[in-house]
Amino acid sequence: MNSPDSLLFPGSADADATVCSAKGCRSAAVWVLAWNNPKLHTPERRKTWLACDEHREHLSQFLGVRGFLKEVVTLAEWEGRSASDG
């Protein structure tokens, strides 16, 4: 699985902070939206977008309309999975 660590906001005051993937948003991420594009990725591949509470639904709809959205989980749950895979 992809780690949301690769989605850190460049130049963030807190280097360990994760921020929402919505354009222009600097809010802390709370959600991980796992997705893939079936025309480009193998079925097990998961790419990730991060979302704050405000943008979770919008980003989910964007991916869902295209048939890309596979799963929405809390950032804490996603990180827990990564740690146990580890």
Image: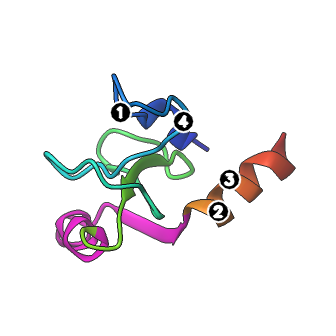
| Circle nearer the N terminus (2, 1) | 1
Q: Residue at x 74, y 56 (%)?
A: 81
Whether tag 3 and tag 1 are in contact, CB under 8 A, the answer is no
Q: Residue at x 67, y 65 (%)?
A: 77
In whole angstroms, how far apart are the C-alphas of marks 4 and 1?
A: 10 Å
Q: Nearer the viewer, residue 66 or 19?
A: 19
In whole angstroms, how far apart are the C-alphas of marks 3 and 2?
A: 5 Å
**Residue wearing tag 1:** 9
Query: Quick check: 4 left or right of 49?
Result: right
Q: Residue at x 51, y 28 (%)?
A: 15
User: At label 3, which amino acid type do we have?
Assistant: Glu
Q: What colouring method underlies this structural image?
A: rainbow
- Magenta-tinted stretch: 56-74
Q: Nearer the viewer, residue 83 or 62?
A: 83
Query: Quick check: 9 left or right of 17?
Result: left
User: At label 1, which amino acid type do we have?
Assistant: Phe
Location of the C terminus by quadrant is top right
Secondary structure of residue under mark 2: helix
**Residue wearing tag 4:** 5
Q: Which mark is residue 76?
A: 2
Query: Quick check: 29 left or right of 84?
Result: left
For the residue carrying disc 2, how many other residues have a C-alpha within 10 Å: few (<14), some (14-19), or many (20+)?
few
